[in-house]
Amino acid sequence: MNRIVRSLDSLNPIICSECGEIYGYWNYCNDKTRCYRQLCSYDCSSRDKKVYPRTSLKVQEEWPTSFDIQQLVTLCHCCGKELLKSGSKWSVWFCDYCKGRVREFNVSYGIALIPIGRHSLMNQVVLDKPFNERAVNNFTAGIIGLQNRIGSIHEWRKIIIAQNLKFLGYSCDAPLDDYLSKVKMLPSKEVAFRKMSRFFLPTKHKEGAVVKKATKESKEKKLKPGELNKKGTRLVQQHRYREAITCFDEAIKIKPRYALSWSNKGNALLGIGNNHVALDCFNEAIKINPKITEGCFNKGIALYNLNRYSEALICFDEVIKLDYDFPQVHQFRQKALFLSAPDFNLLPSDTCVFCDKALEDVGGFRIVAEQERGIFLYNNLNSISIAMKNDSWRTVKVFDDLKQFFVIWGEKEKWTERAIGKAKNEFASGKHPWYCQICAGLKSNKHDSLIEKTTGVDVLYEGGSIKCKL
């Protein structure tokens, strides 16, 4: 940072009194023959009218490729008292002190209400798997809300820099070096943060950001926890998740061990795609009331969305114990079981996929692949050998909304639609389909008996492991 300041000082950068950004020239890699020009904010009305300090250096129009944004430095967007490195999509807008206070503030509300940078990942706005319609809608709503809040942080930057300049006695644009030499005279960073937090709290963003109105209403009307919980539930049904979270928070403040509000808050957080914080809420609800069925189910959904399928499976099994007919639990259990297959071996299905006979009835081994035919579970087409990619193989999705599928190959006369349908149902129920030696044609030509020393085939064993018999 000292190197950056020195390179800027040599070219006299200036703070814009309208937008609060820095404009002027700067060197790159100590090149004394050329420089680059940093403009103030794109929405500044006087941007094109600025008078830049004179320079004898050649001004480069195109910036180095290492910059995502044509900006070398900026001032802390909260206090305006520190110069920060910028230019990257990952750049943070706050000094260390203000960044720590902003993070504490965001955690307390379960959302990045005050954005710390440009990129969505820096503000917990992500497209969660599985990539279904609900996930896409949540992500879209999150991006729209983030854009609104980023606009608000830029508005606050203008306000705080204008206040600082007025406090220090500037009536127009100010030299950066002179400004930085006087910042100790400004109010503390904590004072600036408190002002900024008050600036953000009343703001009603399009997505329904946290507002103080709900808090005031609860105090004025003295709503009970149960009434706040009902109000929050109605807001969730209207997809007004942020306002719902405020209601649940108020209910929890009044009654900290209110399991239903903890669970409902988690459900609202699921609605905005914040699975990590939602998971904490469900854990708290279950800690208070281990038999809260909806909280346990939604915990499984949060784990499922985070691709922690084995843990989600445990939750869904617990829900079935509490309420066997709970809506959608069996459907999600099947998917979690299927997707958790890489974590452990799928156990064999009960009967042969072709003849419907159990192994005890026909003897021999459970076969999943040999030279003539086979069946396997895959996650992507690239993992299938080139030798298999011919007219005799086919891919089948187990669930329409998941990417995983199984591959079959061999004679079409053998792989009838009935056999394929049975295999699909077996995979969906968390079991691995197989076929017997008789259906594989592995019999002695002389005695019509099974060939004991079968070789060159993949065999499915009782515990779910698959091994090739050589």
Image (spheres, rainbow, N blue to C red):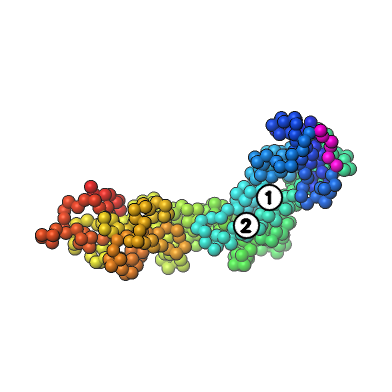
* Residue at the outermost bottom position: 418
Amino acid on which the number 1 mark rests in the picture: Ile
Amino acid marked by disc 2:
Gly
- Is residue 360 visible from the viewing direction of this image? no
Q: Residue at x 84, y 36 (%)?
A: 54
Q: What is the magenta segment's predominant secondary structure?
A: loop
Give the residue pinned by disc 2.
Answer: 142
Q: Which residue corresponds to mark 1?
A: 114
Residue in front for this viewpoint, 430 or 372 = 372
Q: For residue 435, say whether it is visible.
A: yes
Relative height, residue 402 to residue 22 (above, below): below
- Could you tell me if the residues under marks 2 and 1 are in contact, i.e. CB atoms within 8 Å? no
Report whether 135 appears left or right of 368. Answer: right
Front residue of 154 and 412: 412
User: Is residue 53 within the magenta segment?
Assistant: yes
Looking at the image, which residue is at 66% across and 63% down?
223
Residue 180 location, quadrant: top right
* Residue drawn 36% across the image and 52% down it: 385
User: Which residue is located at x 61 percent, y 59 percent?
Assistant: 140
The segment highlighted magenta reads: 51-56
Q: Which of the two discs, 2 and 1, labels the residue nearer the N terminus?
A: 1
Left or right of 341 on screen, residue 36 = right
Q: Quick one: 318 or 10, which is closer to the camera?
A: 10
Q: Residues within 10 Å of mark 2 (few under 14, many from 20)?
A: many
How far across and how far down the image is residue 372, in percent?
26, 58
Horizontal and vertical percent position of residue 128: 54, 55
Task: Classify residue 178 as left or right of residue 208.
Answer: right
The answer to whether residue 157 is magenta is no
Q: Secondary structure at mark 2?
A: helix
The N terminus, quarter of image: top right
